[in-house]
Structure formats: structure tokens, C-alpha cells
Amino acid sequence: MKRLLYIAAIFLGGLYSCKDEVKWVPDDYHKGAHEIPSGEYVTDRSFKMVAYYAEANEPDSIEMEKFKMITHLHYAFAYPNADGTIQPLIKPQNFAKIMQRAKENGVKRAVSFAGSQAIYSAIAADSVLRSKFIDNIVTFALKYDLDGIDIDWEYPNAGLSNDITFEKFMKELSGKLHRYHLYLSAAVTAGLFAGDVRDGITPGAVEAMDFVNLMAYDAKGLDPQEPNHHSTYVIAQKVMDAWLNIKGLPKEKAVLGFPAYGKTADPTPLAMSYRELLKNGAKPLLNSATVITGNRTDIYYYNSLDVVKLKAQLAKDNANGLMVWELYQDANGPNSMVKAAYDVIK
């Protein structure tokens, strides 16, 4: 009897021991495990049509046909915390919906990381925080089955030594993303003003990126023929010249951006989406419109479809892609800016 009790005690002890051990391993422990792809990572050098999507906008208001006209969708935005962790997405339902639609149409998907200058400066300058943030970004990309990551740090500043730390950050991030065959891009300043902001992005940082999205807008006063306009064809030419010939950006990495919105010429300008401008009487073949909203009458400056086509041709001849901010703000149907660009680059 004692021997039976002894054997039973050993058996029960083994069960409790197994129970204690198993509780540390969750049922879905295998989820999130990602194999490193075989072979060397090869950068995609095909011509790109990149569209940012702002998470607050309703995905159902974007016609499905547009997803056949773009090659990359960048969800804006995700944000870092000061400790290198990532904040929860504000609109997870919109994220799920827009990413699924992009995936169904063979569009490459990325999340764009934005945030404050102070947080990025502190993280990039601290090797421990930098490594932690990069690991969290890669984990995020793998978790959501992304094709890449976009960085929208506005803007690295050489006066804050960001030229050094941004380069380190991008090189380390690139190395870990490329290990999983994921791409890295960034949205950058127009680069038209010499100084700490333009110098904040070094050739080493550019080398780490697969492509660079040139924000050729919000630059009022740089076209003497249209001084009130923030994004003319002449401004696009100047941005291309600054990045290709002054900053030394390789043509195969250059993606020229255009805005799907208009702005007033006020010192603190108002902005209105292209789709709303058309609803308020703006014409798709004009570059400005007088809009009455409430008790206000304002002139908004935007890109006509003809200007979009000229920019698309400029990108086709001198760069390797075109980018729009932002997909929802574009009109649907025949007056779509994305369609106008697609008709040129296809």
C-alpha cells in the first residue's frame, strides 16, 4: 500500500511539475515566429506609384479601381513612445480594411512612422533605445505581414546632430528589415533650402533606403510665376534638381511627391482636399479656385490634372516613382489625380 502511495505521489508530483512548466508557454507560442527568407535581399528597382493613406479617413470612400493604379500603400501613421515601444494604432479597423484591399490588389504595404522631433532625436541618439525601437518596428512589420516600413521623421536636423544619429538609425533599421526581405523608405523635405534640415539627411542614410519620397509641396513662394502656389511644376523641377544634383540622390531611388489638396496663400494657410475642392466648384483643369465656406471666401491653389500629368512625366523621365499625399483626398472617377498620373506612367 505504501509503495502504491509512493508511486501515486511521484505521478501526481510529475503532473504538477508539468503544469507549472506549461503555464509559461502560451497556447499560441508558435505564432509570430518568422523564418528568415533564403537568398540575398534584392531592392525593387521598378517604377513606383506610392500612395499614403491617412488613418482618420474612411477607406470605403476610396474607389476600388484606384488600388489597381498604385504599387505601394503607406498607412499613416504609427508613433513611437519615448521608451522605444510603439503606440497602438488609433484606427485599427481602418488599418485592417485598407491593408486587406491593398493586398487583394497586389499592392505592397507599409506603415509610415511619424512622431515628434524630440522623441526621434532622443531614441536615435541612444544606442539601447535605438536598438529597442528598431526591434519593435521589425516585430510590428512581421506581425502585420507588411512588405516594408516608411519613416516620416520631419525632419532630421544636423544642428541637433541628427545627421549622425539618423544615419545610424536608418542603417541599423535597414539591415534588420532587409534580413527579412522588407523594404525601407522615408518621406523627406523638399531640400530647397540650404541649412541644418537639408544637411540632416546624409548620403549614408540615403544609401540605407530602398527609395526616398520627395515632399515637393508646401513650398509657397518658390515659383516666381505662381508665387501663391505651394506645389507647381516648377517647384517639382527644383525639388528634383536639389535632390538629384545637390544631395546626390540616385535616380533609381527618387520618388516625386505631389499633393491631393489645395492651400490658401495666407501666412497660416487653410487646406482643403482635392475631392472637397471639386465639390465646392473647383475645376480639375485649373490650378486655383475661389471657394466660399460659411462667411469666408478664399482662393485655394492646387494641381490641375494637366500639372499632375506633367509631374508624372517628369518622374518618368528623371526619377523612378511618383507619390501622392493622400489617397482619400483624391477625387474618384475620371477627375482622379491618381488616374491622371497612372495614364502617363502605365
Image (spheres, rainbow, N blue to C red):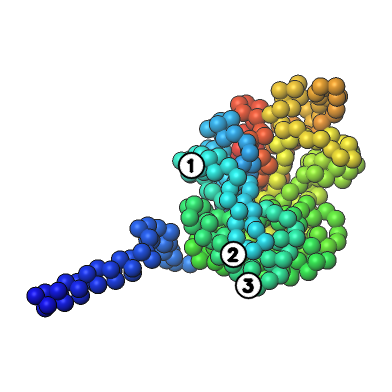
73 or 271, which is in the foreground? 271
What residue type is disc 1 on?
Gln
What whole-number distance in Å separates the C-alpha atoms at marks 3 and 1? 34 Å
Disc on the earlier residue, 3 or 1: 1
Element type at marker 1? Answer: helix
Callouts 3 and 2 close, C-beta under 8 Å: no
Instruction: Point out which mark residue 55 bears.
Output: none
The structure residue drawn at horizontal position 86% and vertical position 24%, both measured from the top left corner, is 297
Viewer-side label of 3, 2: 3
Work out which quarter of the rendered image holds the C terminus and state it. top right
171 or 83, which is in the foreground? 83
Instruction: Decide: few, some or many residues near mark 1? Use Cα within 10 Å; few <14, some 14-19, many ≥20.
Output: some
Return the residue at label 1. 100
Residue 339 lies, in percent from the top left, at 62, 33
What whole-number distance in Å separates the C-alpha atoms at marks 3 and 2? 10 Å
The structure residue drawn at horizontal position 67% and vertical position 53%, both measured from the top left corner, is 114
The structure residue drawn at horizontal position 55% and vertical position 31%, both measured from the top left corner, is 60
Tell me if I can see residue 254 in this picture: no
Return the residue at label 3. 128
Work out which quarter of the rendered image holds the N terminus and state it. bottom left
Viewer-side label of 2, 1: 2
Instruction: Decide: few, some or many residues near mark 2? Use Cα within 10 Å; few <14, some 14-19, many ≥20.
Output: many
Tell me if I can see residue 169 in this picture: yes
What residue type is disc 3 on?
Val
Return the residue at label 2. 134
